[in-house]
Image (spheres, coloured by chain):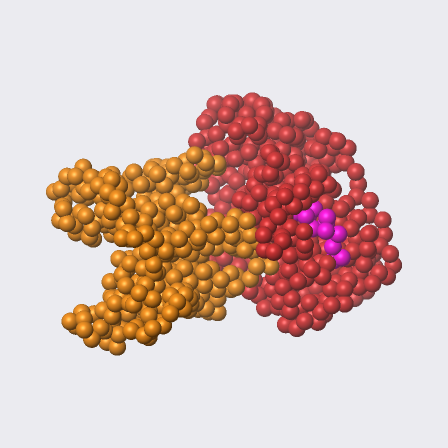
Chain colours: A red, B orange
Amino acid sequence: MTELDAAAGAGADETGPPLIAMHGITKIFGSLVANDHIDLAIRAGEIHALLGENGAGKSTLVKILYGLLEPTQGEIRWRGEPVRLAGPQEARALGIGMVFQHFSLFENLTVAENIAAAMPPDLSLAEVAAKARDVSGQYGLSVDLDRPVWTLSAGERQRIEIIRCLLQDPRLIVLDEPTSVLTPQEADRLFVTLERLAASGCAILYISHRLEEVRRLCSSATILRAGRVVATIDPRAVSAREIAGLMVGAALHDVVAGRAAAEGTPRLLVRGLSLAPEKAHGQALRDIDLVVRAGEVLGIAGVAGNGQGELFAALSGERLAAAPDVVTIDGKPVGHLGVTERRRLGAAFVPEERLGHGAVPDHRLAENTLLSRHGTGGLVSRGFVLADATRALATRIIETFDVRKEGADPRARTLSGGNLQKFVVGREILREPGVLVVNQPTWGVDAGAAALIRQALVDLARSGSAVLVISQDLDELFEIADRIAVIHAGELSAPEATGDLTRETVGLLMAGAAAPKGTVHAH
Amino acid sequence: MRIELQQRTAPSAIARLLAPVLALAAAFLLGGIVIAAMGRSPLAALDVYVLQPLSDPWALQEMVVKATPLVLIAIGLSFCFRANLWNIGAEGQFVVGAICGSTVALATHGTAAGAWVLPAMLLLGTLGGMAWAGVPAFLRARFGVSEILTSLMLVYVAELILDYLVRGPWRDPKGFNFPQSVTFDEAATLPFLTDGGRLHVGILMALVAVIVAFVVMGHTIFGYRLRVTGEAPRAARFSGFSEPRTTFIVFAISGGLAGLAGIVEVAGQIGQLKPSISPGYGFTAIIVAFLGRLNPFGILLAGLVMALTFIGGEAAQITLRLPFDLTRTFQGILLFCVLGADALVTYRVRLVRGTPAQAAGRAA
């Protein structure tokens, strides 16, 4: 912390106009005011956080900053001079770099080739590699330039994106939720890099909803709510709880977890599940055993891409197991049964991707109720869709889970991430399933929605269901899971009671260090 | 200088509705230029192609007769296209339907076989089209072979089989060596709706198909299944809809309707098998499906419009001595315009100066 403060202080330029200043930025889409007179100023050498719930207007503001959207009103000054950003090229030419949440890399090319692809074609691969090596050495971004991208972890991939961005010699770097795919150890390394960048005079706009990180890394923060700036604060001087309160506009309630009954009956049972990867560079599952008992939440931690998607597909029945008794729901072998049959046995599933997997983007919410519930009664009669019933169910989900939306029955894609996730999770929980499998329940979801979803998961378990939560967010698992197992390279570690685990031991397992038996209990 | 397509954030609903109309207008304009380049008056061509048929009762009847197979096939194709599956071989399924249905007509030729002949023909025609479409469906579901290629290639196989049959085993012995079968008996011919008219009961089948498709597509779980499969395949899997099964079903529907169209055409207005039973209905129906926005009533309308180009094309051959290929050209231009209009509704065209590398170079 003190080292960071010194670094930030050394780099920050306190005199003259700020590097970039946005004044009275307003953006209106139809009847929606996404940004309402937003002021934001960042000085060179400053790490500035942009905080807000999903739908608060963060992405709109960042798109304006990167020239992807034009503001309806307001002005942007770069070093005191008014500028107009008509496109990303112009933003880049000024010195604004962007590291997106989703990587755009060619899996089959090497790191150096991926970097060269973003550079002028008159540079040879060797020249690009030399430049990349310089930058990576300077900022602690170690990555093997000759390895193909598909062999790399998410942390390494992110480093490629950062190197690509740094080679454009930016004065301001925007990072969108950079730690969402990293292990705690990888995140620590990223922070070191960012601190060095700031110390060298680069300004950083850091978008995140992990408040502890922001408090550790950033010297100032702008908080948005419903398109407006509600506060500009020094996050180090304010508690995470207070910041969260500013973001949602109300005091947040902690999830009331309680404890699972000691030994519930097993409701979801997996024995010796192995699965070949479906596509190239997929992850095979190797001999996975797990039990989820009535009344408990079992958490599965892991870095993205270690088999979570495959495990979800095998549990939901999107992919079938080798034998019926590999997966058992309430004592019934279901390994050979499809998704609909498993749902009829009382199981429910929430996939990681909301748009395109958990919901059809261009379908309305009422139609989206059918997606997972067409086979479990009430919505379809003799092959005909009961439109009134789907609308009634959608309304019930919307009311119970506080889904905020525009218009009576909007298309799924128009909802903010948090609200759509509440809808998708609510659609399953309202069925009161005996077994619920959720993959990344609060990924990219704002604090208010995340708290509501986590509470609903815990409540469901306490009512006697077995809940399996696959998540990359350790804080979330420590908050709601009774036991935690770690998935790495398609293998699952033995679950341990959450109280017996520390973040460090789980972090090591996530990074692939096999836990010597016994050390896990040492804490 | 290069052209970029940028996705619009909110495509306008009015633009979406107007797109086919504007595409039609643009196609007429381009067609006019082609005709002018051939040294004929575009206005005279417009008169022969469009205005004369629309003001002539005989031509109007003929338009409905020609629209019948187009609508039947296009309705079937709309099921495929909704599910993002590409049956390009309706022409072949049409021909195989005609062949299979005709077996009954030829086997009972000259006998006193009764009222069962016609239903049996229609049934066999439908099944034949289904079976022909089943091949690409199977290859796709089992081996992941592109259904676009296989369905298209089977068109030529079907046409050659028909050619062989009417020149060989099924040739009318009293037909002066023309490649054609005997003329079907009355029991094997679709009845006309009015005495002396050209409208046969096949037209009613097309109308029934339109209405059934409308109900199925908009109000059943099956229609929902197709839309989910087409729009979000992963969501379809999550929903428990098996993709191979969907593939088989939509190919069965589109193949079946194309086969039905084939036997209806042969038993309705031609009355015998010959190599030229289709002026390309199976391909034109693809344009009909898209011009009609995959909406059953839109397809009905689009079918009539495309039928008009056939009638006008025939008239233009006679009065303006314009080749029939011009009609095909016009249909092609129309498809381009329809797809282009769709793209412009979804995307905005931007002219960007410089290459991406130059832009990156400037930024660096």
Q: Position of residue A16 (x, y in %)?
A: 56, 22
SS assignment for the magenta stretch, majority = helix
Pick the front one: A309 or A174? A309
Q: Check the image and name the residue furthest to the right.
A: A262
Residue A82, compared with residue B118, is above or below; it is above
Pick the front one: A401 or B112? B112
Is residue A132 at all visible to an observer of this figure?
no
Considering the image in quadrants, where does the N terminus of chain B appear?
top left
Q: Position of residue A487 (x, y in %)?
A: 68, 60
Q: How many marks?
A: 0
Pick the front one: A454 or A302? A454
Q: Quadrant of residue A153?
A: bottom right
Q: Is residue A426 magenta?
A: yes
Q: Position of residue A191 (x, y in %)?
A: 64, 44
Residue in the image at 83% along x and 63% along y:
A265
Residue A447, compared with residue A296, is above or below; it is above
Q: Position of residue A219 (x, y in %)?
A: 67, 33
Q: Which residues are magenta?
A: A421-435
Q: Is residue B93 magenta?
A: no
Q: Check the image and name the residue furthest to the bottom.
A: B169
Is residue B29 at all visible to an observer of this figure?
yes
Q: Quadrant of residue A47?
A: top right
Considering the image in quadrants, where does the C terminus of chain B appear?
top left
Residue A148, compared with residue B30, is above or below; it is below
Residue in the image at 36% along x and 41% along y:
B20
Residue in the image at 70% along x and 30% along y:
A234
Left or right side of A464 for B101: left
Residue in the image at 15% along x and 71% along y:
B176
